């Protein structure tokens, strides 16, 4: 074998990239992938930035691969791009959808069981086919405004990127872009535990079964230090469980339930949620029990019969802001309402609504709240979403 000469790189090779976009979606998780697909399908030049190496967030990296709920009281209440992705994952994996007729004895009976690995592939494929540019392993360092546009400085391993965009969609789960801009966020002193998902015993069959889980108390997704601590705590808890059998599967990350929420133009309260309040600017439904996890476990509080909550556009808009919208579990809400709103189907619906509003705002050169509401609703319906209200 002949050795080849190597030339030392003393300068350091850092790629410098400049990107112009109509819409920058930060975070490629449950809400973010759907938001990016919607914005791009609506004709917006869209950049999706994800600090990990795949899309799907809690559903893929976290392993909570049973999104719900898309149906309530015998009818579908959430459809659109999220349903397209989840249902296609089940179909292509050879699985079966639940029987959605009637009211199940347990809400979990209407959850889809999906192959998390296939979902990540399909989410990426649909992004690329829609024209979304994906930047993995990158994250914003700073955000500022200039001449009516956002200038976002981003970094990743060996990469520095400057993004100039008209609209930002914050789908980080923690409202991190909102926080960078100094806008207020909500969070209580106590947060719900996270979960580390794993499987002992027989081989894991994705799309056919749920994984085992251990609680990660004090799990905090605020920053890299607290995320590291949560992952270490979760893995140590799994290690203590190995007496139950051979470890055959372990998720790479803790699945977080609760973190920062934006302070929006409207805060969805528990009463709004459990009463099924129809907001005048509702852009999607949500459906799930009030589901607050504590150190003692969880006792879901089902919604009353025929109640289906709604999410207003104003709950996705940070108070007093322009040209930024947030979607997913960081939706403006109190803690009890958020425990139902945070689930995946609802976050997908919020992501699609945010992507539609951002695309139209970029096209019309307006703030999302200045876009005529019927324009947003019309675009959502054109892309298969179910919009609350008389014209549903």
Image (cartoon, rainbow, N blue to C red):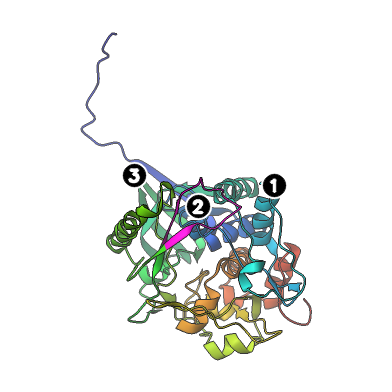
Regarding residue 26, the answer to whether it shows in the image is no
Task: Residue at 57%, 45% (x, y): give it.
Answer: 121
Task: Residue at 54%, 58% (x, y): give it.
Answer: 210
Quadrant in the picture for residue 181: bottom left
At which x and y percent is residue 105?
67, 75
Task: Residue at 61%, 48% (x, y): give it.
Answer: 122
Name the residue nearer the viewer: 282 or 131: 282
Circle 1 residue: 94
**Inter-mark Cα distance, 3 to 2:** 21 Å
Regarding residue 126, the answer to whether it shows in the image is yes
Magenta-colored span: 196-213
Task: Residue at 76%, 73% (x, y): give it.
Answer: 75
Magenta residues: mostly which secondary structure?
Answer: loop
Where disc 3 sits, the SS reads: loop
Q: Nearer the viewer, mark 1 or mark 2?
A: 1
In the rendered structure, which disc, 3 or 2, sits on the residue that comes first in sequence?
2
- Tell me if 186 is positioned left or right of 65 in this view: left
Q: Quadrant of the C terminus?
A: bottom right
At which x and y percent is residue 182?
35, 74
In the rendered structure, which disc, 1 or 2, sits on the residue that comes first in sequence?
2
**Inter-mark Cα distance, 1 to 2:** 40 Å
Q: Is mark 3 in CB contact (under 8 Å) with mark 2?
A: no
- Tell me if 114 is positioned left or right of 88 in this view: left
Circle 2 residue: 20
Circle 3 residue: 157
Residue 201 highlighted magenta (yes or no):
yes
């Amino acid at each position: 074998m002949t050795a080849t000469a190597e030339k030392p790189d003393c300068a350091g090779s850092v790629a410098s990239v400049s990107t112009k976009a109509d819409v920058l979606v930060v975070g490629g998780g449950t809400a973010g992938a759907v938001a990016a697909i919607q914005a791009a399908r609506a004709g917006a030049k869209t950049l999706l930035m994800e600090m990990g190496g795949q899309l799907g967030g809690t559903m893929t990296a976290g392993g909570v691969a049973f999104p719900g709920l898309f149906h309530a009281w015998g009818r579908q209440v959430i459809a659109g791009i999220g349903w397209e992705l989840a249902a296609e994952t089940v179909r292509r994996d050879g699985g079966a959808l639940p029987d959605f007729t009637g009211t199940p004895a347990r809400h979990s009976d209407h959850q889809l069981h999906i192959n998390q690995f296939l979902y990540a592939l399909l989410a990426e494929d649909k992004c690329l086919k829609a024209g979304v540019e994906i930047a993995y392993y990158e994250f914003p360092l700073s955000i500022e405004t200039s001449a009516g546009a956002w200038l976002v400085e981003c970094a990743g391993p060996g990469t520095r990127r400057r993004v100039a965009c008209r609209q930002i969609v914050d789908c980080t789960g923690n409202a991190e872009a909102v926080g960078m801009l100094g806008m207020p966020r909500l969070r209580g002193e106590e947060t719900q535990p996270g979960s580390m998902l794993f499987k002992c015993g027989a081989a894991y069959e994705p799309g056919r079964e749920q994984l085992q889980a251990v609680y990660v108390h004090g799990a905090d997704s605020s920053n890299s230090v607290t995320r590291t601590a949560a992952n270490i705590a979760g893995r140590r808890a799994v290690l203590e469980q190995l007496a139950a059998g051979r470890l055959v599967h372990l998720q790479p990350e803790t699945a977080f339930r609760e973190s920062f929420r934006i302070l929006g133009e409207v805060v969805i309260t528990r009463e709004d949620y459990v009463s099924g309040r129809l907001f005048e600017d509702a852009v999607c439904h949500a459906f799930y029990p009030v589901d607050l996890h504590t150190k003692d476990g969880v006792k879901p509080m089902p919604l009353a019969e025929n109640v289906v909550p709604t999410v207003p556009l104003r709950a996705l808009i940070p108070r007093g802001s322009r040209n930024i919208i947030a979607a997913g579990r960081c939706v403006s809400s109190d803690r009890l309402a958020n425990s139902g709103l945070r689930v995946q189907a609802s976050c997908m619906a919020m992501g699609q609504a945010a992507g539609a509003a951002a695309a139209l705002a970029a096209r019309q050169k307006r703030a999302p709240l200045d876009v005529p509401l019927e324009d947003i609703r019309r675009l959502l319906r054109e892309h298969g979403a179910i919009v609350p209200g008389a014209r549903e």
